[in-house]
Image (spheres, rainbow, N blue to C red):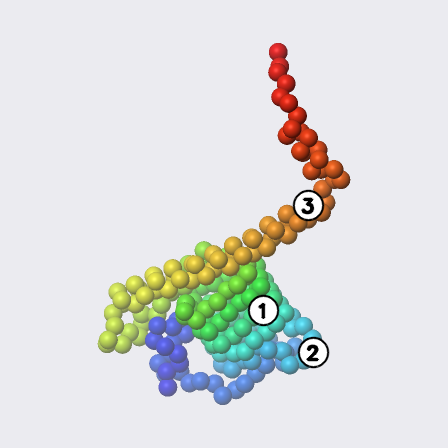
Amino acid sequence: MARGKFWEVTFDPNGVESSVEKHLDELDNLAGYEQAKVRVQGRKPRRLNLKDKRFSDCELQGGLEKGSFTNCEFLGCRFIGTHWTSVKFSRCRFERCHFLHTDFTSCWFTDCVFETISVSAEHFKCVTTRINVSQFLGAVTTNLAFLPVYTTAQFQLSQLTKSKATLAQILYRSNEEIFGENFFAAHKELIHSRPRGFEEMGWNFLRAPATGQG
């Protein structure tokens, strides 16, 4: 049975879905997971913070709220129905990964690397999330190695262009939302920290008659 769709970078015509199910909060003494279905939601009553973990040919599912990944690698992984809220990814690597029905809300990607990824643009959401837009888009591609007879490489590349345009709108809008929040927060702080009588000083300056010089 094939693993995924032909245009996904993780597609494997002879792939076998793993029946092994793992959870992220069971990784304390492990280096990572390989060829496993990984449930991302934590089951223990603590914040999930993972460091130096490696996920290879895994399928990640579920949702995680508040947590962090530092120096982690996701290689040949499929993010299928994953929901991330207030999660920080620092110096992580996403290589040959596919994203489907995935959303990031109030997340951070700091010094992360994206390389050869595919994204189902119509099933991807990114809200108030800080991410390197140009690097992410530059890594988005399509798989041309297993084209069925009813399509062509030219058509798939045209579909890729449309998908990247949609993704660009989603990602830039997300960054704009962050800018808006930061701008209004800074403006609010400026208003509260201004000296007493600041408005009166400015108003009196504007009303003062101009004086000639010379």
Residue found at x 35% / y 81%: 13
Give the percent coordinates (x, y) of residue 83.
Answer: 54, 73
Q: Is residue 119 visible?
A: yes
Q: Nearer the viewer, residue 98 or 66?
A: 66
Up the image or down, 3 lies above or below 9; here it is below
Q: Are marks 2 and 1 in contact (CB under 8 Å)?
A: no
Residue found at x 67% / y 34%: 202
Secondary structure under the numbered disc 3 in the rendered image: helix
Which residue does the numbered mark 2 point to in the structure image? 45
Q: Mark 3 or 2, which is nearer the eye?
A: 3
In the image, what residue type sits under mark 2?
Pro
The image's mark for residue 176 is none
Label whose residue precedes the other's in the sequence (3 or 1) = 1
Kindly indicate the quadrant of the structure image that contains residue 42.
Answer: bottom right
Q: Mark 2 or 1, which is nearer the eye?
A: 1
Q: Is residue 50 visible?
A: no
Q: Nearer the viewer, residue 164 or 68?
A: 164
Secondary structure under the numbered disc 1 in the rendered image: strand
Give the percent coordinates (x, y) of residue 163.
Answer: 37, 64
Kindly indicate the quadrant of the structure image that contains residue 64.
Answer: bottom right
Which residue does the numbered mark 1 point to in the structure image? 85
> Along the horizontal axis of the image, is 75 left or right of 156?
right
> Along the horizontal axis of the image, is 14 left or right of 72?
left
Up the image or down, 109 lies above or below 212; here it is below
Label whose residue precedes the other's in the sequence (2 or 1) = 2
> Along the horizontal axis of the image, is 137 left or right of 210?
left
Which residue does the numbered mark 3 point to in the structure image? 191
- Give the CA separation, mark 3 to mark 2: 40 Å
